[in-house]
Amino acid sequence: MNAPYLPQIELDWKQIDTVFLDMDGTLLDLHFDNYFWLEHLPTRYAEVHGVTREQAVDYLNQHHQQTHGSLHWYCLDHWQAIINTDIVALKQEVAHKIQWRAEAEQFLRYLRTLNKRVVLLTNAHQRSVELKFSHIPMRDHFDDILISHTFQLPKEHEQFWATLEQHYPVHKQRSLFIDDNIRVLQTARAHGVEHLLLVQQPDSTREPNSAHPEFVNLLSYRQIMQA
């Protein structure tokens, strides 16, 4: 069966030197993370702590709501303290679900043919990054790997890019940033990052998100790779 037609997204690659890429939901299928946090963790927490699954869901949801959008939301050390269980070991139990998003690896190879600087820019905790790298051969695709925990701010924070620039050279007018988080892209745009793309289907098992009017929406990397 032929792949469905998708309109080409015109990027002037001559105006782009650096490509910043999110990891979960952008390069990797968000299904792993959604499954772990919404299905596997509540089940295992209930088993380990002798509570019902409903009680586990309520407890975890409370902490999700309290930390949403903060660095704690992404911090495995924080969550390990909350659940009093080795969270990386729990992730390993379902690590077979860690997968590339469609065409993501091909796109990374394509960027090499264009001689772009390719930078991973993720909110994921260092141990989560290491787990993903141990299952998916990603590391060698990047010139640099930047983790927001290093800067003590999540990418959503209004001071993130200013803080990043103190440690890493960013030519905002000649950078492309691809992410699946609208708030993250809004922050990047407010700081002057010129080229922005919003991933519309971060989880392959769910329907694409509704197109967001503020950004160019990306369904497939085929839309930005020329034949």
Image (tube, grey):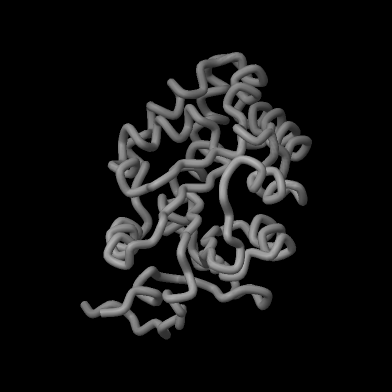
The structure residue drawn at horizontal position 36% and vertical position 42%, both measured from the top left corner, is: 97
What is the x, y in percent for residue 143? 39, 47
Q: Is residue 28 above or below residue 102?
A: above
Residue placed most toward the observer, 189 or 106? 189
Q: Is residue 104 above or below residue 52?
A: below
- Residue 192 occupies quadrant: bottom right
- Residue 195 occupies quadrant: bottom right
Residue placed most toward the observer, 15 or 124? 15
Residue placed most toward the observer, 73 or 147? 147
Residue placed most toward the observer, 22 or 194? 194
What is the x, y in percent for residue 159? 76, 47
Q: Is residue 144 above or below residue 25?
A: above
Q: Determine whether, in the image, residue 122 is placed left or right of residue 55.
A: left
* Screen quadrant of the N terminus: bottom left
Q: Determine whether, in the image, residue 209 is placed left or right of residue 98.
A: right
* Screen quadrant of the C terminus: bottom left
The structure residue drawn at horizontal position 69% and vertical position 32%, both measured from the top left corner, is: 72
Q: Is residue 15 above or below residue 65?
A: below
Q: Determine whether, in the image, residue 169 is placed left or right of residue 107.
A: right
The structure residue drawn at horizontal position 52% and vertical position 38%, both measured from the top left corner, is: 39
The structure residue drawn at horizontal position 75% and vertical position 40%, both measured from the top left corner, is: 65
What is the x, y in percent for residue 211? 59, 75
Q: Total number of numbered labels?
A: 0
What is the x, y in percent for residue 127? 48, 27
